[in-house]
Amino acid sequence: MRCTTVMAKQLIDTYAAELPSTVQQAVHQSTATTTAKRYQLLGDDYADADSLRKLAGAIRQHALEHLDTYLEQAEESLAARGAEVHYAVTPEEACRTVTGILQSAGITKVVKSKSMVTEEIHLNDYLAKHGIESVESDLGEYIVQIDGDHPSHIVRPIIHKTRGDIARSFEREGLGDYNDDPETITRRARKFMRAKYLEAGAGITGANFVTADTGRLVLVTNEGNSRFCLAPSKIHIAIVGIEKVVPSDADLAVLLNLLGRSATGQQLTVYTEFINGPRRKDRPSGPEQMHVVFVDNRRTQVLASDCKEILRCIRCGACLNVCPVYRQASGHAYRSVYPGPVGAVLSPLLAGDKFKELADLPKASSLCGACNEVCPVDIPIPDLLLRLRHRAHEEHVPSPGTPPMEGFALLGTHPLIWRAAMTFGAAKDYLPLDRLPVPYLGSWLKKRTLPKWRGGKFRTWMKSRNGKNGNTEVNGAASN
Amino acid sequence: MNAREQIFSGIRNALAPLPERAPRPEVPHGVADAQWLADEADNVALFVKRATAVGTKCFSSVSDCLSWLFEQQTRKIFIPDSSGEFAAKFVGFLEVVRNYSRDQVDEIDASLTPAAGAIAESGTIILTDESTPDRLAALAPWTHIAVVRKDEIHRSMADALAAMPDDPNIIWVTGPSKTADVEGILIQGVHGPGVQGCLLV
């Protein structure tokens, strides 16, 4: 009611409003279906899935708070098995390291398996600038790549595209005449990708987990593309965020059981691959070299912040699927690599000195808490969103969409003005409120009637309830 | 300071102010087992049930496997020496290739390679570099058949993780290659096998 200026829309609302209804329906349907499958499967398979989530959260939190130990241990385990470990603080450094490895081996063509951290560091663009062809091998990521687009979901990168869009892209890329049959699209991709795998000098992957005790990189896919990236290539380069380390193989039993169920409603992803070194004399099939590039890209800053819990994330996308805001706005509205509730926390944190540009994202939430309830590692996302809102406030980031509250602040901090307002507030009952020049208020009041003014009576009421002994009637009754 | 030192000092500085660090939670073996696992007495039967549910075709005899391959009009199958006595049973029925080379990627319709084990709980086949002499051979053909020894079937994922072999590449295969990237419609056979078989011995 105190809002007297035109409310500016939040940026995310603008995106949601501009989203074609077909896309919005597709996003809504797909996310709702996956959410339902997740609930069904977890309910069927566990009497108490909630305590399993909490255990997984505790495993990840422990790993993060001992990252110095576990990262070093993972490095030793990998090195002992013949892998070369590199570190990169910045995206530029990570890209340079990868390019250096490829150039020194004379490699100009690589295939890539889906990896969020490589999206973060914009690896494909960097490689292209250095004359290295990098082809995304995950079907969805490949389509994103040929369209010069960005993934709009962590697990389902082309959730925002229709089969018609894809068929047109394939036709444009010379993969055959227009055909929007999903099976035909998939077969064409299979044929095209096969040639790419065989001619690639290196395969680039991310990692879902790294175990400290055995140095295993865990990669999960449904398509089998990560395995294909590592079958014919001479070199395997894995680009991994430093936070992916977990203590041991035994922890994977909890994490893998939750990852597939949370991400796609599968008990287990089709291909779950464990890699801890290049080929050996007695195991001569794989790549000759294995490189692991551990990337910081401000993760150490996040670890130092009051939002470190977000680093537990295992990138399942369950919080996107359940989020009412994501379902309306889709992924591009988050204007960063990570969309949805996890993105609303992680993206502003990873933005560094560009925090302000993404400081609106933590506000794009009703704090309904669904994201926390579905999170397989129990990240308290609503709490983190509040902490980031607080930070935005402390840093004086302008906040479109928030009604001006100065008037109320004045009232609330000056008892005299407050009491006066309470007395004269009764005038409200006689004012034509629906004609006030306040956006939305008029239309809102057309269908609703405000209750009669009772302001300012609380103290009187409270005093009247205090008995002579200073006890309220209710308390007195309760003690008898 | 190089990147490694910078990252480690960043981590240490971030963790230094914590009054105490989160303790390592106890992870009891089997804590994440599916609740119905306890009701299943027979590992082999459970494996077949779960594998079938994810789209893996299970066979208990070479002849069943062969007739299934005929149905799919398989012509050329790769069977490595490590498959032992099995290769002989296919010779005469199919063109059996004993050495896999990249030039033949498009010609070989099927491959039969020994698995390193299986997981009953999830219907998963376990392949390793030791058991599969050529990664590509178990991945590129449209049809892959893994030979699983019944006495090598682990009960749960947790059991399999507790007995991980020393191998640079262990892969759990739970059904044929799949995607739902195009409008959420499930299509099998994206990069890996479109048909996954399992011969139990």
Image: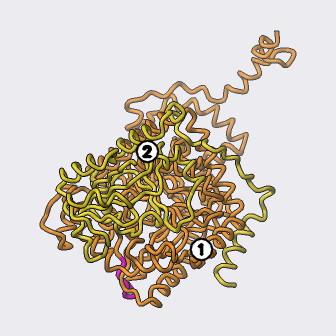
Chain colours: A orange, B yellow
Q: Is residue B147 visible?
A: yes
Q: Nearer the viewer, residue A417 or B139?
A: B139
Q: Does the CB distance between marks 1 and 2 fall below 8 Å?
A: no
Provide the residue designation for mark 2.
A324
Q: Amino acid at mark 2?
A: Pro
Residue A183 lies, in percent from the top left, at: 21, 56
Give the mark, 1 or 2, whose residue is nearer the N terminus: 1
Q: Amino acid at mark 1?
A: Arg
The label on residue A81 is 1
Residue beneath the point at 56% across and 76% down = A83
Q: Nearer the viewer, residue A231 or A193?
A: A231
As helix, strand or loop, the secondary structure at mark 2 comes to helix
Residue lying furthest left: A177
Residue beneath the point at 52% across and 32% down = A428
Residue beneath the point at 21% across and 69% down = B107
Query: What's the magenta region?
Result: A129-134
* Left or right of residue A429: residue B114: left
* Left or right of residue B27: residue B51: left
Residue beneath the point at 58% across and 54% down = B163
Residue B150 lies, in percent from the top left, at: 45, 46
Q: Mark 1, chain letter?
A: A
Q: Is residue A2 visible?
A: no
Image quarter of residue B95: bottom left
